[in-house]
Image (cartoon, grey):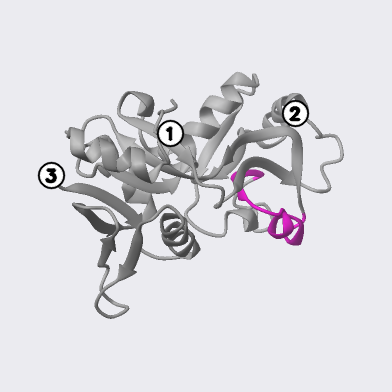
Amino acid sequence: MTLTLALPSKGRIQAETIAWFAGHGVEIARTGDARQYAARAEGAAGLEIVMLPAGEIPGALAEGRVDMGVTGEDLIRERVPGWADRISIARQLGFGHADLVVAVPAFWIDVERMADLDAVAEAFRARHGHGLRIATKYHNLTRAFFQAKGVADYRLIDSQGATEAGPMNQSCEAIADITSSGETLRANHLKLVEDGLILQSHAVLCLSKTAEIGAQSRETIDRILGGDATPSG
């Protein structure tokens, strides 16, 4: 029976994923030219590789169109409501580290914590007639985090690129975005909110709970994971 593994179709995470599988006895090689998103695997019988954009892999797992997949934990949690019912995280892979954080203009000296942001929001509305605009690609995670922190007077602005430039360009007042080192935030005169860490994300190997994975495929998964395929939610 075929075991389908979805890998990111490009980028650094693809190369690191291929290296990770090589260290676990599975050699994955791209096939065709650079314009073709195809690959083959050796070392695991019946393992079929499909290449998808990282952002599409969560949906493919949730719908059972692939059995396994590697993507960012942030994408799993953001893009699949009730994800734990349909996807299990089998392993954090040790790369692809990035933090989803709240950042505000560095000159906002009165804002150090999320409670400060809530206080500023009230004054901001009184002065400007509308709530704080928070630019993000992560609407679900950000909304849940702000609710947990008791911040209510804001609206989310969709951002699909250069989110960190939003406050400088006056398209938003603050952002919730992924960062690995914080250098891009500092370059755009932003600072982290002290308790504004929404999620510490990693590249993760996930299993679909909705796909029909046979006993032989389960054995292959266990072998790849070194006998430890205990899912986490």
N-terminal of the two: label 2 or label 1?
2
Q: Residue at x 38, y 25 (%)?
A: 84
Task: Give, as a three-letter code, the residue at label 3.
Answer: Met
Please provide the residue range marked out in magenta: 173-189
Residue on which the image places disc 3: 1
Give residue 205's quadrant in the image. Answer: top left
Q: Position of residue 93 (x, y in %)?
A: 50, 46
Q: Residue at x 64, y 19 (%)?
A: 150
From where the camera sits, is residue 133 visible? yes
Residue on which the image places disc 2: 123
Callout 3: SS: loop
The answer to whether 108 appears left or right of 201 in the picture is right
Task: Give, as a three-letter code, the residue at label 1.
Answer: Asp
Q: Position of residue 210 (x, y in %)?
A: 22, 30
Query: What mark, if any, has residue 51 been given in the picture?
Result: none
* Vertical arrangement, residue 28 with respect to residue 86, above or below: below
Callout 1: SS: loop
Task: Give, as a three-letter code, the residue at label 2.
Answer: Ala
Q: Residue at x 40, y 36 (%)?
A: 227
Q: Residue at x 51, y 33 (%)?
A: 141
Query: What mark, if any, has residue 228 been given in the picture?
Result: 1
Residue nearest the observer in this picture, 176 or 54: 54
* Vertical arrangement, residue 144 with respect to residue 43, above or below: above
Residue with the most extreme right position:
109
Location of the C terminus by quadrant is top left
Do the residues under discs 2 and 1 have CB atoms within 8 angstroms?
no
